[in-house]
Image (spheres, helix red, strand yellow):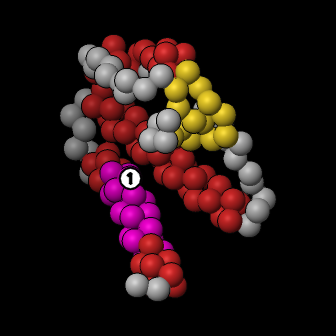
Amino acid sequence: MTRERRLEEMRREFVANVSHELRTPLTYLQGYAEAILDGLATSPEEEEKYIRIILDETLRLRRLVNDLLDLARIEAGQLMLEKETVKMPLLIQEVRQNYYRWRQKKRYSWLYPVKKTCHRYGGAIRIDCSKS
């Protein structure tokens, strides 16, 4: 397979994945908004739950769009991601603290990779433990 064909195939796969990732939260937004408008929430608490889901999915969409914009900026040479090595125990502690309330509510425990270090690109958002 030529390089051009591989790149075109990767581009098509990327577009399909992005489309799916955008469609999912949009489906949630539409469904819960329609449920509220149709009066399907049986209590103020249930309506608040629907509104919180709508807010969460809106924030998810915003993150996805921001990631796409970052990719465009990287391709245009306008954004450079600096690579740094981070110690996993410290990173895990940071994540545990950031998601403490969520973990309490969902009653989740945490399992994490055995690797002692990972590489972080462009700050705390992008982490790659596959090449450590």
Region of the chain picked out in magenta, as a range: 11-30
Magenta stretch prevailing secondary structure: helix
Residue at the spot of label 1: 25
Regarding residue 8, the answer to whether it shows in the image is no
In the image, residue 7 sits, relative to residue 35, either above or below, namely below
Regarding residue 56, the answer to whether it shows in the image is yes
x then y, percent, for residue 100: 43, 15
x then y, percent, for residue 14: 44, 68
Q: Residue at x 39, y 64 (%)?
A: 17
Is 22 contained in the magenta span? yes
Q: Nearer the viewer, residue 126 or 97?
A: 126
Is residue 19 left or right of 128 when viewed as pictured?
left
In the image, residue 63 sits, relative to residue 87, either above or below, namely below
Q: Among all residues in the image, which is located at the extreme right?
A: 78
Asked where in the image residue 87 lies, by quadrant, the reply is: top right
Q: Quadrant of the N terminus?
A: bottom left
Q: Residue at x 54, y 16 (%)?
A: 90
Q: Nearer the viewer, residue 16 or 48?
A: 16
- Counting every numbered tag in the picture gives 1
Graded by Cα atoms within 10 Å as few (under 14), some (14 to 19) or many (20 or more), the crowding at tag 1 reads some
Is 14 contained in the magenta span? yes
Q: Nearer the viewer, residue 101 or 117?
A: 117
In the image, residue 16 sits, relative to residue 102, either above or below, namely below
Mark 1 is on which residue type?
Answer: Pro
x then y, percent, for residue 63: 54, 47
Dot 1 falls on a residue whose secondary structure is helix
In the image, residue 59 sits, relative to residue 24, either above or below, namely above
x then y, percent, for residue 25: 38, 53
Q: Residue at x 57, y 36 (%)?
A: 119
